[in-house]
Image (cartoon, rainbow, N blue to C red):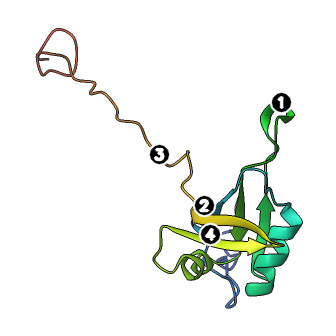
């Protein structure tokens, strides 16, 4: 039982709290030239040099079945404005790290891509068997 005489509870956020921005909005998709893969540490140091303390995570997935070098990766920043600064209204931007080229593009999550859905209506235009209720 709650105490009716208890003071009301109000959760207060820190005045310094940043608004939540999903990781997908703070990310860039990276592609590497075949035969010129980059390590996560190389990518991290490159972007951390441009935007100190604003790189949250870098991932370079290993190819399936261990065949060949990695051809892509992802960098997640701590602020959603960084990908916009990097891309500067271009679809693709190229850089070199240790003499190896890589390209950045806006990250588009497979989770946010929705397939067209079919209608639940029946061919007669009704939404349930037997026609009208």
Give the spatial CA distance, label 1 vs label 2. 27 Å
SS class, disc 3:
loop
As drawn, the label of residue 24 is 2
Instruction: Tell me if 49 is positioned left or right of 115 in this view.
Output: right
Residue at 62 percent across and 79 percent down: it is 82
Given contact means CB atoms under 8 Å apart, are the residues at marks 3 and 2 in contact?
no
Q: Nearer the viewer, mark 3 or mark 1?
A: 1
- Residue occupied by mark 1: 65
Task: Point out which mark residue 113 bears.
Answer: 3
> For the residue carrying disc 3, how many other residues have a C-alpha within 10 Å: few (<14), some (14-19), or many (20+)?
few
Image marks 3 and 1: residues in contact by CB distance under 8 Å? no
Residue 46 appears in view = yes
Around disc 4, counting alpha carbons within 10 Å, would you say few (fewer than 14), some (14 to 19), or many (20 or more)?
many
Task: Specify the quadrant that holds the N terminus.
Answer: bottom right
Which residue is labeled 4 in the image?
26
Distance from disc 2 to disc 4, alpha carbons, whole Å, reads 5 Å
Q: Is residue 24 left or right of residue 68?
A: left
Could you tell me which residue is drawn at 41 percent across and 36 percent down?
115
* Distance between the alpha carbons at the discs numbered 3 and 2: 12 Å
Q: Tell me which numbered mark, 4 or 1, is placed earlier along the sequence.
A: 4
Q: Are marks 2 and 4 in contact (CB under 8 Å)?
A: yes
Quarter of the image where the C terminus is located:
top left
> From what the image shows, is residue 111 above or below residue 90?
above
């Amino acid at each position: 039982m709650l105490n009716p005489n208890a003071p009301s509870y109000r959760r207060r956020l820190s005045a310094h709290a940043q608004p939540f921005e999903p990781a997908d909005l703070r990310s860039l998709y990276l592609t590497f030239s075949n035969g010129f893969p980059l390590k996560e540490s190389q990518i991290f140091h490159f972007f951390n040099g441009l935007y100190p303390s604003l790189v949250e995570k870098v991932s370079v997935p290993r190819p399936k079945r261990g065949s060949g070098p990695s051809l892509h990766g992802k960098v997640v920043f701590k602020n959603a404005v960084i990908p916009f600064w990097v891309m500067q209204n271009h679809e693709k931007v190229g850089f070199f790290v240790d003499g190896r080229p890589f390209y950045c593009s806006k990250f588009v999550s497979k989770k946010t891509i929705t397939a067209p859905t079919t209608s639940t209506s029946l061919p007669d235009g009704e939404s349930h068997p037997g026609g009208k209720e």
